[in-house]
Image (cartoon, rainbow, N blue to C red):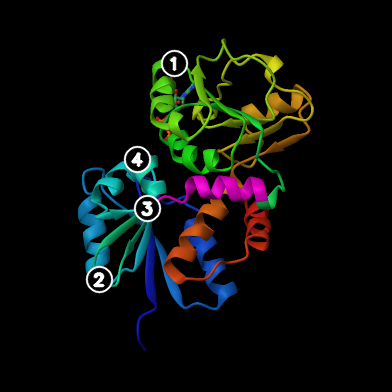
Amino acid sequence: MDMADQYAVIGHPVAHSKSPKIHSLFAQQTQQRLEYKAVLAPMDGFSATVRDFFLFGGLGCNVTVPFKQEAWQMAQQRSTYAEQAGAVNTLMRQADGILYGHNTDGIGLIRDLQINQQYALTNQRVLILGAGGAVRGIMQPLLETNPSEVWIANRTEATAAELVGLFERQGQVRSSGFSAIQGRFDLIINGTSASLQGDMPPIPSTCLDADTVCYDMMYGQEPTIFLKWAKQQGAERCIDGLGMLVEQAAEAFLLWRGIRPETTSVLTTLRASL
Ligand code: ATR
């Protein structure tokens, strides 16, 4: 019997990645025959791992921590999302052999908000916490939805100011440290990795009210510290990043297979397995 089409997620660590489960659910649902594995690359061996994967017939892979910038460098052609994100989370070998790099993280976040959560971003005032790779990855798709303003607040102010420099031509963007945040926002997105250390970014409670949508790009069995805080402040809609994870995967699947899987049932299955 011939081999199924090969896909993978490459990272370090990678054993706990939910991508193999998500993509096998997509494959079942769309009746596509493919195999999707988790591949651990040595810290100094990402490009060799990718080269081998494609050499042995791999068609596409996802890239996760800490290799998204290296994947950007390896890609011979890039989508504008990948270009602007400075990071690649999806690689594909084109028919002409060219290695194509895309970034579906930001698209995944926006689809989760607009479609799954039915939240329209147009004219909304948005606060983003953090200014690292994860935040840079969502800036272009976010600004394409035409929010009235995007305010980037970060512990290290200079990093937030750099992001403003990169994106100010695409919309109303400004930056500050946490304590200087002013006014009320329609949407707050936590894109810091502070919750991994159990830290809450020290932001003024005046930036939200009951109608402020609060979104954490992280997820877990329990609500993140940011979502717990938001709930305590009275915010009624608190959303974690599991939907973003499933949507970024669906967008990669679409690029590779030319078919968009349905995500609601996959999200339900995944939620139950957390
Ligand atoms: P990622 O790929 O997750 O974005 P990153 O590029 O290292 O990782 O960025 C991490 C982000 O989380 C940064 O905005 C970082 O703030 P600094 O730029 O000041 O380092 C933020 N962050 C990490 N730990 C934090 C903490 N304990 N409190 C507040 N912000 C934190």
- The residue at label 2 has a CB less than 8 Å from ligand 1: no
Q: Secondary structure at mark 3?
A: loop
Of helix, strand and loop, which one carries label 4? loop
Main secondary structure found in the magenta portion: helix
**Mark 1 sits on what residue?**
157
199 drawn magenta: no
Residue bearing the label numbered 4: 86
Q: Earlier in the sequence, mark 2 or mark 3?
A: 3
Q: Viewer-proximal residue, 15 or 181?
A: 181
Cα–Cα span, label 1 and label 3:
29 Å
Q: Does 8 sit left or right of 28 as displayed?
A: left
**Do the CB atoms of the residues marked 1 and 3 lie less than 8 Å apart?**
no
Q: Amino acid at mark 2?
A: Asp
Query: In front of the other: label 1 or label 3?
Result: 3
- Give the alpha-carbon distance from disc 2 to disc 1, as whole Å: 44 Å
Using the image as rendered, state which of residue 18 and residue 253 is in the foreground: 253
Label 3 to label 4, Cα distance in Å?
11 Å
For residue 79, the mark is 3
Disc 1, SS: helix
Q: What residue is disc 2 on? A: 96
Residue drawn at 56 percent across, 10 percent down: 180
The magenta-colored residue range is 102-114
Residue 268 lies in quadrant:
bottom right
When the figure is inspected, residue 74 is found, relative to residue 227, above or below; the finding is below
Among the two numbered marks 4 and 2 on one chain, the one whose residue lies closer to the N terminus: 4
Q: Residues within 10 Å of mark 3 (few under 14, many from 20)?
A: some
Nearer to me, 141 or 28: 141
Which sits in the foreground, 180 or 65?
Answer: 180
* Total number of numbered discs in the rendering: 4
